[in-house]
Image (cartoon, coloured by chain):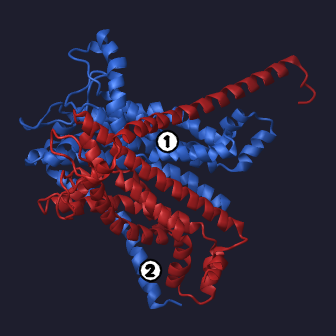
Amino acid sequence: MVTPGDRAYDLIISACALLIPLLLVALIIVTTIAAGPTLRDHLADLLLGREWNVARGRFGAAPAIVGTMISALGATVLATPVALCAAIFVSELAPRRLRGALGFLLDTLAAIPSVVYGLWGALVLVPWLRTQVIAPVHAAGLFGMTGPAYGPSLVAAVLILAVMILPFIAAISREVLLAVPTTQREAALALGATRWEMIRDAVLPYARTGIIGGVLLGLGRALGETIAVAMVIGNRHAMPHSLFDPAESMAALLANEFAEASDDAHLGALMAVSAVLLLFTLLVNLGARLLVARVSRSHGEATR
Amino acid sequence: MSQRAGSPQVAAARRARHRRNRLMQLLMTAGATLAILPLIAIIGDLAMRGARAMSISFLLRSPAPVGVSGGGMGNAIAGTMLLVLIGSLIGIPVGLGAGLFVAERAHTRLAQVVRYVADVLSGLPSIVVGVFVWELLVRPVGRFSALAGGVALGLLIIPMVTRATEEVVRLLPRSLIEAALALGFPRWRTALVVVLRTSMPGIVTAALVAIARAAGETAPLLFTALGNTYWSTNPFRPIAALPLQIFAYAQSPFDDLRAQAWAGALVLVVLVVVFSLIARAVLQARQALLRGGRSSPLTGDRESR
């Protein structure tokens, strides 16, 4: 029996649910329209141009795109092995009590606001890098570095991003690993496998898709991370020559200039940067979520 | 196997396998330790440097004029509260409705699409959401405002609350809902009286976690709420926010302001950790309750009346 109350209830929750896909569509449409003129007229300049100079009306975002890619990929490469070890430890090796506590620690690390990571990066990590790493490299004349040695640099961004996405990748990998059926492990152990052989041959192959999805999600986070990167990367509009140079990223560029942009060309260029960033992260997230969802869905059906 | 178990080659191979096993377990343990080292370093620095600048006047006063020492982040804390309030008013009801929808019709195509899109949305950079809200609410009006900042936070809260609600509601035993329907409850009353009431502790804590996360967001506020060095509670004007203030002070050359940035960060992290701890405790208690069966939530509910 369907009462009027039921009809109203269905209507309300359906509207709320529909709002979510609509939001994504609106986000894409509004960003594309706002960036449209610049993307149409100056796409090549934007993607390939190396000069970003507001006064001269030059808006080449290549250094920002390269900075985004290198910092995000570097962080992912650095964080993934450690995150996987942590996830495997938590799901397969740790005693039951430690398991919960470690999981909670990793979740907490993932929930710390990025401005806090940025603060720590800018006031602790960057000074340390300047005196302990970059100055010596600089003094040794490596990488053709000239001028003064800076602390804020691409490598600072890589490190802080790695710290930020590590718990995130670990948390998703842990979930995926916990979704591997216990029978899978018991079968391997019954055949005489050692613990590591069980993990390698029975658990990891089963979880592989989900773990790749988790790593991609981490990459997506790193690509879009804004404040922490803006605080440590140096924000210099130039192509970095090495990891020890100051650089910039797309998100940091938006954070630094958007509020003050007044003329249309500048604003249009920033909108276009935002659209490119949206496109990158959207593709990464769409793919990653498909991989993760495939694993956890089969798990959901198996346990029900 | 047992026939050849004594042969030296087999014994050697077994020793090698076990050595490798120990080595790899050691490696995993080392990885796990390495993973929590940054947490210890960051929390340690934060607690030490933050506590030093923490004071009542820091929590209550607005920033002092340039060159004058003292002052605090009181206006930013109030601003964050207002922003989060606006964000929650938008994000929580919508997220709740969408979460109920996804949980109730878990196997329909639409529910799967909604869940997938909610996950994708929560992975998108929050600065892009900031640009979106700027285009909709700041550019047409010609003014930065607390309202725009709150809306941006609300958009970030929606997917978080949706997924959390779904997860909590799906923990409910199917029999509970069927019992209510069998008693002649219409579906909407079942949803409100049985599903929502029994899930309420879980939903409230999930909402708290979403709020704590939203309170820490900086990027979407940069060009919506903008920041403000004065007290303001006008939703149509720029407003200060804790993360914005930390961002600004971290780049300041003055030690006094940097110290205040640490104290502000400590406030944010304490907020996040406390809310996460509450959420964890409540979720565990609920899981125990729902699995225990001895005191079902329904009978518990009846007795309490």
Amino acid residing under circle 2: Asp
Real-space CA distance between mark 1 and mark 2, rounded to the nearest whole angstrom: 38 Å
Q: Where's the C terminus of chain A, which quadrant?
A: bottom right
Q: Is residue B88 left or right of residue A273?
A: right
Residue under the image location 29 percent in, 14 percent down = A138
Q: Position of residue A236 (x, y in %)?
A: 21, 30
Residue B210 visible to the viewer: yes
Residue beneath disc 1: A167
Q: Is residue B179 left or right of residue B75?
A: right
Q: Position of residue A11 (x, y in %)?
A: 40, 80
Q: Where's the N terminus of chain A, which quadrant?
A: bottom right
> Which chain is indicated by disc 2?
A
Vertical placement of residue B170 versus A186, above or below: below
Identify by letter the chain in blue: A
Residue under the image location 13 percent in, 63 percent down = B141
Q: Position of residue B167 (x, y in %)?
A: 54, 63
Residue beneath disc 2: A10
Q: Earlier in the sequence, mark 1 or mark 2?
A: 2
Amino acid residing under circle 1: Pro
Vertical placement of residue A216 versus A138, above or below: below
- Foreground of the two, B221 or A278: B221
